[in-house]
Amino acid sequence: MAIVVNMPRLSDTMEEGTVATWLKKVGDKIEEGDILAEIETDKATMEFESFNEGTLLHIGVQEGETTKVDELLAIIGDEGEDISALLSGGGNATATAEVVEEEAAPVEEAAPEATAELPEGVIVVTMPRLSDTMEEGTVATWLKKVGDNVEEGDILAEIETDKATMEFESFQSGTLLFVGLQEGDSAKVDELLAIIGPAGTDVSGVAAGFSSAAPAPKVEAPKKAAAPKKEEAPKVETAKPAAPVAPKKSNDGGRLFVSPLAKKIAEEKGFNISDISGSGEGGRIIKRDVENFTPQAAAPVAAAAGPAVANEESFEEVKNSNMRKAIAKNLAKSKFTAPHYYLNVEFDMDKAIAFRKEVNAVPDTKVSFNDIVVKACAMALKEHPQVNSQWFDDKMRLNNHVHIGVAVAVEDGLLVPVVKFADQRKLTQIGAAVKEYAIKAKNKKLSLEEMEGSTFTISNLGMFGIDSFTSIINQPNSAILSVGAIVQKPVVKEGAIVVGNTMKLCLAADHRTIDGATGAQFLQTLKGYIENPISMLL
């Protein structure tokens, strides 16, 4: 069963990619999740993992070569399988879709005409891959409605990925003729999202054709793209446009613009929609506005009529967000593939407390204990590159640069913005960067570039009163540092029991890259910086 693998869109602005390194060669066995290649995008060099299993039968782009998004990258199939039919038309013959043969269907079976033939000027827009790990997306907000004129570069919708809610801009001009997903609906990457074309064009046949076919290829008229083979799958009805909603009034009597999803969430939370300020286009209230809204005096949610029944079992089911599903997948993979071990230490924080107090006495200066830990880790990592390493199946990468990921808790889970070149930044610069990233994270406005490339991660739960804890490594990093609260307690100094301030830390390390002694030496160096923070300025 041959599968055509195309150049993926690994960033929201990526139009073409360059193969930096192939990590598999023709003839190699491929498992789902294996890293096929390192792809250089317009933002970074990223790993591209396989979503399929089989044998690598063909490589269409050699190392150092560049090709457009959705053009032929490789072919995976059964060992010895004849793929001459897939190659006979060249790269463009298979560039627009993943072609998957049915088990019982002959190779020569033609695809449905409905997906191959498009009216002149009509363009099918599919769910984009807006992050390297994204498998499906949810439409948070449509910024255009059916019938609107769309120019190249206009923002069509806000798409919730596994990492953030991102704006998706149109690469085409025309009229928005059809919307395949309503706000709050989800679809796999490359499935039908919308159709754009000349005003008045009937695209009902196009939409119906995609609803009964495999995931829709990205098609640009007037080219005729190879369509996926028809699968025996239950029919999925084409999503109908939402019924028009009567305009609401704001508290000042003006018209209130609100997305259906935001309205639904506000009703579920018991919020008065008129109290919420909109951040969408034209002041429109969208999902994130409701999620970030805190009523000054929250009205109690109306209870069900009648007294509650004693000892009655009840529960609520909450649909897993894309972010939550990605966290589950990535952390499970890390926990069960990387042999974790843990090193626990307790540092004297008396000098760090005094140091921070002196620094913050300078006008317009504010640093936190977390900023001190980030700076200390960055300097210690320069002395212990093994801890600043990354593990790959066939090699270990010792990074000379220090990019520290700082875990930030958000409503749906956890985001890890990256303070790049942290060892070269001043404490105040680290503090400003972490504060900015935390605000962006809570508003789901972090860009992919701001979350990529970490070489080490810090997770701090001290501000929540947690004394000590362990964390799961943020792969492909080799280690993560868990930071607890500063606690006042009796300590022994120079033979006497006195009141002191201590902080517990736990280093989770990957034994494939970091030996126990190496991890211990790193923590000793870190101890020197944190217990004597003035040394970081020398």
Image: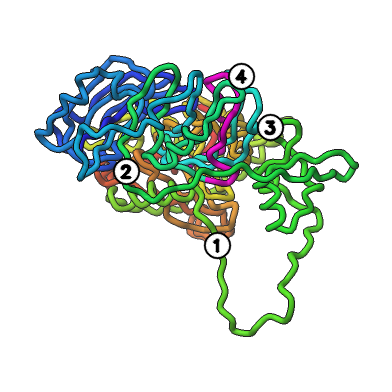
Q: Secondary structure at mark 1?
A: strand
Comparing 367 with 227, the one in front is 227
Q: Which residue is mark 2?
A: 231
Q: Which mark is residue 466?
A: none
Q: Residue 57: x, y in percent?
A: 16, 29
Q: Which residue is mark 4?
A: 151
For the residues labelled 3 and 2, the Cα–Cα distance comes to 62 Å
For the residues labelled 3 and 1, the Cα–Cα distance comes to 32 Å
Question: Which of the two labelled residues, at mark 1 and mark 2, occupies the earlier sequence position?
Answer: 2
The amino acid pointed to by label 4 is Glu
In this picture, which residue range is highlighted in magenta?
A: 162-185
Q: Are marks 3 and 1 in contact (CB under 8 Å)?
A: no
Q: Name the residue: 47% across, 37% down.
A: 405
Label 4 vs label 1, nearer the camera: 4
Q: Which residue is mark 1?
A: 490
Question: Which of the two labelled residues, at mark 4 and mark 2, occupies the earlier sequence position?
Answer: 4
Comparing 84 with 439, the one in front is 84
Q: Name the residue: 47% across, 39% down.
A: 208
Q: Residue furthest left?
A: 80
Question: Which of the two labelled residues, at mark 3 and mark 1, occupies the earlier sequence position?
Answer: 3
Residue 177 in the magenta stretch? The answer is yes
Q: Secondary structure at mark 3?
A: loop
Residue 521 in the magenta stretch? The answer is no
Q: Name the residue: 39% across, 17% down.
A: 223
